[in-house]
Image (cartoon, rainbow, N blue to C red):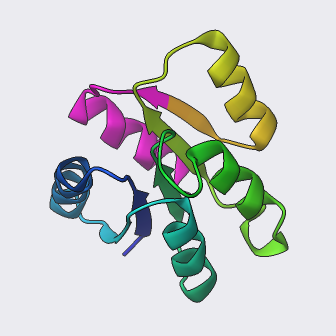
Amino acid sequence: MHSILAVDDSASMRKMVSFMLIGAGYQVVEAVDGEDAFEKAVGGNFDLVLTDQNMPRLDGLGLTRKLRADPRFQATPILILTTESGDLMKQAGRAAGATGWLVKPFDPVRLLEVVKKVIR
């Protein structure tokens, strides 16, 4: 079973994403912000990191850069799921090492398609 680290400072968004992913057969670990996510990533083994952008302590781009700087996470897919839809933010995501960028509100079917595509 594939394991996903779901990161969002909104408890309701974390629960909604987790519920959907668990229903699709994935194991999900939740994190409340980028710092919490990094600690859990170092202590776990994840096939995908799905992170919000705007969070306290460490945002999604900061988390992406921190993960990519660690050799253990250079090949781990990282999807940013956020309300940010501007081209500059998407470019910053790519520059930080994000695998993909999805905009909230999201289509659950589309999210699952993307997750399935990036997890090999």
Magenta part of the protein: which range? 102-120
- What percent of the width, then of the height, locates residue 14? 26, 55
Q: Is residue 24 above or below residue 38?
A: above
- Looking at the image, residue 6 lies above or below residue 39: above
Looking at the image, can residue 105 be seen? yes
Query: Is residue 75 something that shows in the picture?
Result: no
Q: Quadrant of the C terminus?
A: bottom right
Q: Is residue 97 left or right of residue 47?
A: right
Count of number-bearing discs? 0
- Residue found at the far top of this picture: 87
Residue 42 in the image: x percent, y percent?
Answer: 63, 81
> Which residue lies at the image location 23% right of the left edge and 47% below the top edge?
13
In the picture, measured across the screen, residue 58 lies left or right of residue 10, that is right
Q: Is residue 59 magenta?
A: no
The quarter of the image holding the N terminus is bottom left
Q: Which one is nearer the viewer's eye here, 84 or 103?
A: 84
Residue at the front extreme of this rendering: 57
Q: Is residue 81 left or right of residue 79?
A: left
Q: Position of residue 101 (x, y in %)?
A: 54, 31
Closest to the observer, 111 or 52: 52
Identity of the residue drawn at 27% across and 25% down: 105
Q: Quadrant of residue 6?
A: bottom left
Residue 88 point in image, percent of width and height: 69, 15
* Residue shown at the point (51%, 40%) measured from the top left: 53
